[in-house]
Image (cartoon, rainbow, N blue to C red):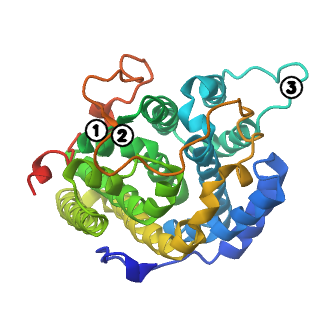
């Protein structure tokens, strides 16, 4: 696959965690115990993805206990995301609202007991387990930030993305870039750096403009690289929420030109991270003990995501035919929402240019909601491709 894609600039060393084998065994047992992976076809696909290797690449310094914990978070996010992206629920925002609110209740500590005669969705069971194992290690301000990031991921994926699919709306590049950091759940994963490193970065650090820039740039690198590697998969699924697809749609580029454009922007974001990193360390030498491991975690994420994407069958063009029939690997028990009679799902993405309705003037499902993403809190809204970079 590497030879078919432009080179992606990444000046950080390849690393892996020595506890990966143990974590693979742990994930097998945990997904069985929580019911996240049940059917044999889903189990086979899960094992091929090798999430244990992925987590070892992006958290290479974690001890065995923390590697198991963040691996479980990874698997939960990936399996929930597959339900929301690949299947019918990705076009039915109303049908997942209840389970998302029940997830909110788990992380806010207001979840009631099981409903009479109900077998709780596997995602709820697993989330309760994750939360119980995560919060003892975290400060209150970390829990508040992590909860906001997690719920913003869920509400953006289930309202904004699903609403776009249902209404045939193609977002602008600028809007997509700002939302992508949420729909990719990358803020959730970056928050876990503090758990792995056993530290608590104060809000003064998180609010520093240079830290915000480093975090935003590293998140963009991870998300955009994922869009490059998952492009073929998402074309099979008819997915419009992919930066390569949107560059083709809005600019009229061919496939190779769009891939090269996005890869060039990834290089720009990597350099933006390096500049912000240097400024942070020069300005706050007294905080090196906190900043160095945090920034190293961002570096590991950029490099590890790239290495895993290059090797996993999940994004291999030779394997993407599996996504033509998502029912073969998606399991209703994950979210507890079954299929309903509907017209057949489209098997290909909308044309790169043309028919789909642009977002201008369209209803925004998350606008005005109290739980809607608040870019002013966590994103600078740089819109790297949609604004200044859009002149290319």
Please tell me how crowded label 3 is: few (under 14), some (14-19), or many (20+) other residues with Cα within 10 Å.
Answer: few
- The tag earlier along the polypeptide, 3 or 1, is 3
Q: Can you give x and y, in whole percent of width and height, for residue 257 in the image?
A: 24, 67
Cα distance in 3D space between marks 2 and 3 = 34 Å
Q: Give whichever of 243, 142 is nearer the camera.
A: 243
Q: Give whichever of 4, 144 is nearer the camera.
A: 4
Residue 175: which numbered mark, if any?
1
Q: Can you give x and y, in whole percent of width and height, for residue 318 in the image?
A: 56, 74
**Given contact means CB atoms under 8 Å apart, are the residues at marks 3 and 1 in contact?**
no
The answer to whether 275 appears left or right of 333 in the picture is: left
The answer to whether 337 appears left or right of 288 in the picture is: right
For the point 83% across and 60% down, the residue is: 40
**Furthest residue in direction bottom, as rendered:** 3
The answer to whether 20 appears left or right of 198 in the picture is: right
Q: Quadrant of residue 168?
A: top left
178 lies above or below 308: above
Residue 118: which numbered mark, if any?
3
**Given contact means CB atoms under 8 Å apart, are the residues at marks 2 and 1 in contact?**
yes
SS at circle 1: helix
**Furthest residue in direction right, as rendered:** 117
Asked whether the viewer can see residue 60, the reply is no
Residue on which disc 2 sits: 179
151 lies above or below 53: above
- The tag earlier along the polypeptide, 2 or 3, is 3
Please tell me how crowded label 2 is: few (under 14), some (14-19), or many (20+) other residues with Cα within 10 Å.
Answer: many
Please tell me how crowded label 1 is: few (under 14), some (14-19), or many (20+) other residues with Cα within 10 Å.
Answer: few
For the point 61% across and 35% down, the residue is: 89
């Amino acid at each position: 696959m590497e030879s078919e894609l432009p080179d992606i600039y990444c000046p950080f060393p390849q690393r892996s965690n020595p506890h990966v084998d143990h974590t693979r065994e742990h994930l097998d047992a945990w997904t069985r115990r929580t019911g996240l992976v049940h059917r044999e076809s889903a189990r086979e696909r899960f094992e091929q993805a090798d999430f244990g290797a992925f987590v070892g690449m992006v958290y290479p310094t974690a001890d065995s206990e923390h590697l198991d914990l963040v691996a479980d978070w990874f698997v939960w996010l990936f399996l929930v995301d597959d339900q929301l992206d690949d299947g019918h629920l990705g076009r039915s925002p109303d049908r997942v609202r209840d389970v998302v609110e029940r997830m909110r209740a788990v992380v806010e500590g207001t979840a009631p007991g099981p409903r009479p005669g109900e077998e709780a969705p596997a995602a709820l069971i697993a989330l309760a387990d994750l939360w119980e194992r995560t919060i003892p290690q975290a400060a209150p301000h970390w829990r508040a930030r992590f909860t906001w990031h997690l719920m913003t991921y869920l509400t953006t994926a289930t309202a904004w993305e699903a609403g776009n699919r249902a209404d045939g709306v193609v977002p602008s590049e600028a809007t997509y870039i700002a939302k992508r950091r949420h729909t990719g759940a990358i803020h959730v994963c970056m928050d876990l750096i503090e758990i792995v490193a056993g530290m608590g970065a104060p809000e003064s650090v998180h609010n520093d403009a240079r830290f915000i820039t480093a975090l935003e740039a590293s998140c963009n690198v991870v998300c955009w690289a994922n869009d490059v590697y998952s492009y073929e998969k998402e074309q099979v699924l008819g997915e419009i929420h992919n930066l390569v697809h949107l560059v083709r749609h809005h600019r009229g580029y061919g496939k190779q030109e769009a891939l090269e454009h996005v890869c060039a922007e990834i290089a720009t974001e990597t350099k933006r991270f390096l500049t912000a990193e240097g400024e942070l360390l020069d300005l706050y030498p007294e905080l090196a003990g906190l900043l160095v491991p945090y920034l190293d975690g961002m570096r590991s994420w950029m490099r590890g995501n790239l290495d895993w994407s290059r090797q996993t069958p999940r994004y291999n063009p030779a394997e993407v035919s599996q996504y033509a029939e998502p029912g073969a690997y998606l399991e209703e028990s994950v979210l507890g929402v079954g299929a309903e009679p509907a017209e057949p799902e489209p098997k290909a993405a909308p044309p790169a240019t043309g028919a789909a309705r642009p977002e201008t003037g369209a209803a925004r499902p998350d606008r005005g909601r109290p739980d809607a993403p608040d870019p002013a809190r966590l994103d600078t809204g740089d819109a790297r491709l949609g604004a200044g970079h859009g002149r290319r």
